[in-house]
Amino acid sequence: MKRRGIITLALALGALYCLNGQESELKSMLADTTLTGTSYSICFADAITGEIVFGFDADRNLASASVMKLYPTAISLSLLGADYRFTTSVFMSGRYNSRKGVLYGDVVILGGGDPALGSAYFSDHYGDVPARWAEALAAAGLRRVTGRVAAAESVYDHNPVPGGWSWADLGNYYGAGVYDINYNDNKYNIYVTGFSEGTVAVIDSTDQYGMEMRIENFLSSSGKSDNGYVYNAPYSTSAWISGTVPADSSMILRASMPDPPFTVVNQLNKALKQAGIKVKNDPVRARVSLNEAAYPPVCVTLSPPLSEIIRTTNHESVNLYAEALRKYLGPATGTGGTFGAGSTVMRNYLDSIGCEPYEAVLLDGSGLSPNNNISALMTTRLLVHMFNSRDSEVFRASLPAAGVSGTMKSYFRSDLFRGRVIAKTGSIGSVRSFAGYVTTSSGRTLAFTMIANGFTVPWRQVTNNLERITGEIIIKY
């Protein structure tokens, strides 16, 4: 029997029951009347053989929150490779008179889907991207442009937002859409000040990436927590903010850029002028056609290797990166520049390794949609596969360590877990989830997934229970 078949069979045989050795903590959790109505999907399996050592409703589909990010990160790593780099190129499109330094045409940016271009996470890698492009154009002798700065036609469709996302999320940084040209994690800052309790809060300013936006203010000053939300649609030029911000304090609301490609076009236009290059016409939002074969790029900006982007995606739980990886799988495999095309690539890959994706609902790649439905069994199957793959070390390095790094800093903080647990976390509303690897007291490595939905108690009560189950498994195995 092929290895895939052995692992799949082992996982399937153990999916519907929990072994007696682990019943105590589980029974305690299920007996807690304050958790009545809570649903669980739990699966622990040997990371090498796929043999299930503990499962409870392992094949039950539940909302997963950010554990969903394991899917596009694992699959893009497997299909593209750890060293893969995205490209963004700048062209002089038209007739260029090198003697006079005059371009009779446009300066055109060609996006290649880089999710991290200009990100603060990779500031040492990118530096000031528009300034570097302007320097390269100046070094090529460019002094004057008779046209304008523009972005080339996109490899993607015009829908930057996954289906199933809430309207309330779209204007905020964590609901940023995916474009062929992304920049600064597709976010900008709105600086606000709250005054005395119950009074109107004031917008002080925005950063340079939000200066083109027209923002209406419906914020009030109240309490000590940030409950301010930004609302805008993709490609819009206006937004409004409502809710409350802390009284008697100043803070930052992080909003999503509605049109990152045009923001980058504007930034390059400014950088050209600062470099002494004259541009006759204003930048345009409309995309322009570009014959790449006719015009070699003046400069090409490479992303960090995919391994580093995936590590940041899973450590910091960056929705944009996860969705960008999912969507990019479409054009990378020649199946189209849509979220649907990327999802098809993901499903086909999952099917090829025995994950049976047709039994799940995969609406996005980040977990922001509350309507995703996956099981602990399917996710653990993916983790077992990745543990035995050529990319095992890189993938495991992308997961934060319990109580130490990334989103796991606040979880599994007991000494029992230190150095033993690495996992992706997930949290939206009444959803908490963990998925990754745990090393037991005997030195055995297990792949695991735990998902809880529908609780009405404080989330810490739920995660404490899941931690206790994990602790018992560490001790007994």
Image (tube, helix red, strand yellow):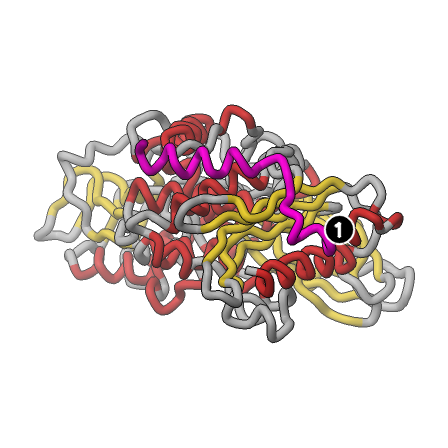
Q: Position of residue 56 (x, y in %)?
A: 65, 42
The residue to which callout 1 is attached is: 217
- Residue projecting furthest to the bottom: 415
Question: What crowding class fits label 1: few (fewer than 14 Cα within 10 Å), some (14-19), or many (20 or more)?
Answer: some
Q: Is residue 13 magenta?
A: yes
Classify residue 292 by image quadrant: top left
Q: Is residue 25 above or below residue 91?
A: below
Q: Main secondary structure of the magenta part?
A: helix
- Residue projecting furthest to the front: 20
> Which residue is at a point 45% across and 33% down the rendered structure image?
9
Say whether residue 347 is left or right of residue 234.
Answer: left
Q: Nearer the viewer, residue 347 or 178?
A: 347
The quadrant of the picture occupied by the N terminus is top left
> Which residue is at a point 51% across and 46% down the rendered structure image?
69
Q: Position of residue 364 (x, y in %)?
A: 54, 36
For the question of whether residue 338 can be seen, the reply is: no
Q: Position of residue 401 (x, y in %)?
A: 51, 66
Q: Which residues are magenta?
A: 1-25
Say whether residue 90 is left or right of residue 381.
Answer: left
> Which residue is at a point 41% across and 53% down the rendered structure image?
310
The quadrant of the picture occupied by the C terminus is bottom right
Q: Position of residue 141 (x, y in %)?
A: 15, 57
> Which residue is at a point 31% across and 44% down the rendered structure image?
109
- Residue projecting furthest to the left: 99
Q: Is residue 167 above or below residue 452?
A: above
